[in-house]
Amino acid sequence: RKNSAVYGVLVRLFSSFMANDGISSGDNISVLDVGCGHGLLVEAWRSVGVAKSYCLEGSIEAASMWPQEHKEQFYRLQDLEAPEVAAAVVATDYVTSFEVAEHLRPESANHFVGLLT
């Protein structure tokens, strides 16, 4: 949980962008973080009222860090390079992904972009 404060800063920054469009975090929005790792950004969204904040992660090691109370419904372990992954993901209003693409094989790029759109 080292550096977890940065995720609150990111959420406040994203929230300010959304506010410029007349959207607030309490407007029943949904967010997906692809490559969420320990889920800290997802938790930060929840802390500002975004109950439908989802996590999609490719590393089994990260799953042990997810909050138990939300793990089954909002957190998912998935091969991010699999062609069918985009079809299996819940549709959300916003998608974030940080420091993920560089870990994937170049031939998976189109699948990954499809996942984000």
Image (spheres, grey):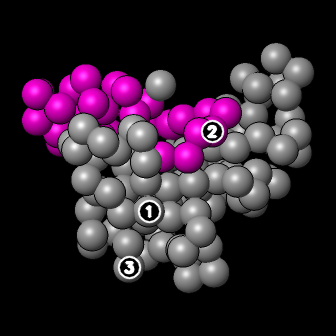
Relative height, residue 108 to residue 59 (above, below): above
Query: Which residues lie in the magenta part?
Result: 89-116
- At horizontal 54% and vertical 74% (from top left) the residue drawn is 72
Left or right, 11 with respect to 113, comes to: right
Left or right, 112 with respect to 87, comes to: left
For label 1, the SS is strand
Residue 45 lies, in percent from the top left, at 68, 52
Q: CA distance from mark 2 to mark 1?
A: 14 Å
Which mark is drawn over residue 64? Answer: 3
Residue 65, picture quadrant: bottom left
Q: Is residue 64 magenta?
A: no
Relative height, residue 40 to residue 111 (above, below): below
Amino acid type of the residue that numbered disc 1 sits on in the rendered structure: Arg
Residue 74, picture quadrant: bottom right
Between disc 3 and disc 1, whose residue precedes?
Answer: 3
- At horizontal 73% and vertical 23% (from top left) the residue drawn is 17
Between disc 3 and disc 2, whose residue precedes?
Answer: 3
Q: CA distance from mark 3 to mark 2?
A: 24 Å
Q: Estimate how packed mark 3 is, as few (under 14), some (14 to 19) or many (20 or more) residues with alpha carbons within 10 Å.
A: few
Which mark is drawn over residue 76? Answer: 1
Residue beneath disc 2:
92
Residue 18 lies, in percent from the top left, at 76, 26
For label 3, the SS is loop
Amino acid type of the residue that numbered disc 2 sits on in the rendered structure: Thr
